Amino acid sequence: MKKIISNILTALVYVFLFAPIVVLLIFSFNASKSLSVFSEPSFYWYKELLKDRHTLEAVRNTLVLAASATAISTIMGTAAAWGIDRLRSRWYKAAINTVTDIPMTNPEIITGISLMLMFVFVGRMLGARNSLNFWTMLIAHVTFCLPYVILQVLPKLQQMDRSLPEAAMDLGCTPFRAFLKVELPEMLPGIVTGAIMAFTLSLDDFVVSYFTSGTDFQTLPIRIYSMTKKTVTPKMYALATIIFFVILGLLLISNFIQNSDEQKREKQI
């Protein structure tokens, strides 16, 4: 009886979580404009989406911003994780980890407002005409993506055998070559997972982007928010469906890499 109740509760939770997504997927293929009555299957709204120049421009801006933030935060996060792992003082390391976790635990609206005020203040000091633009959004996205990359890379370094880099240098490797040959392969699963997480976080961020964006650069979440003030057409369902499958693919890749890494470590043990 307990097992049956447990299965029923689990099924209800999954229905509650995924029912809105299923509705979105179904109505993205609806031929009519109705958001509640399904008439017949059609790719009409996908075709209409391809004709919407402003939405496609917002998609391009979002992808450029997410890719740039991912690249920068992955490089900086990997370097920061490597540096944190080399700290000898336990208290200093704990303090650095606490500071690193602040952007993750801090409410997004506080992060967005504080970054906006800082950018406006610096822009006024430098005499800039527009204090908020693409570069301010990029800095903001790197700010909240960076801790997630560190959080993924640092455990991989802590799991690594400390004697491996020293053994490589004893066999004739320079410190840089030992890093490339020994440490980097050990960190690679965490780096890939952190990069995927940074990309997905940057892709769907709205709150921080809303407060740090200028008038000449609009991302997709901001574009969708502006459309909610009017009637939302099913072509947004089509766009959301495409984004859903892209994110799903990235999550599957991330989970596959993590499972492969765990199996590799089990074999080593």
Image (cartoon, helix red, strand yellow):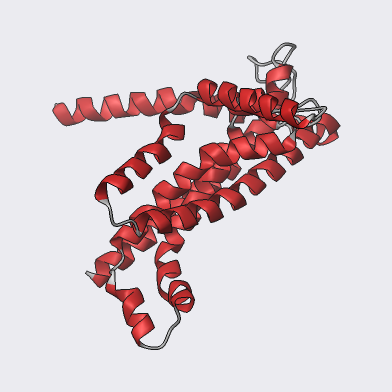
Q: Position of residue 144 (x, y in %)?
A: 52, 37
Q: Can residue 53 be seen in this snapshot? A: yes
Front-most of residues 232 and 121:
121
- Where 90 sits versus 65, above or below? below
The quarter of the displayed image where residue 5 is located: top left
- Where 221 sits versus 99, above or below? above
Quadrant of the drawing holding the C terminus: bottom left
Image side of residue 66 versus residue 123, left or right: left
Front-most of residues 215 and 16:
215
Which residue is painted at 62% across and 27% down in the image?
A: 118
Q: Which residue is at the far bottom? A: 172
Q: Can residue 28 be seen in this snapshot? A: no
Quadrant of the drawing holding the N terminus: top left
Which residue is painted at 53% across and 21% down in the image?
A: 109
Which residue is painted at 83% across and 27% down in the image?
A: 129
The quarter of the displayed image where residue 138 is located: top right
Front-most of residues 120 and 195:
120
Q: Which residue is at the far front? A: 125
Front-most of residues 175 and 45:
175
Q: Position of residue 39 (x, y in %)?
A: 69, 21
How many numbered marks are there?
0
Q: Position of residue 246 (x, y in %)?
A: 60, 44
Q: Position of residue 136 (x, y in %)?
A: 68, 34
Which residue is painted at 29% across and 61% down in the image?
A: 159
- Where 85 sits versus 110, above or below? below
Image side of residue 259 versus residue 191, left or right: left
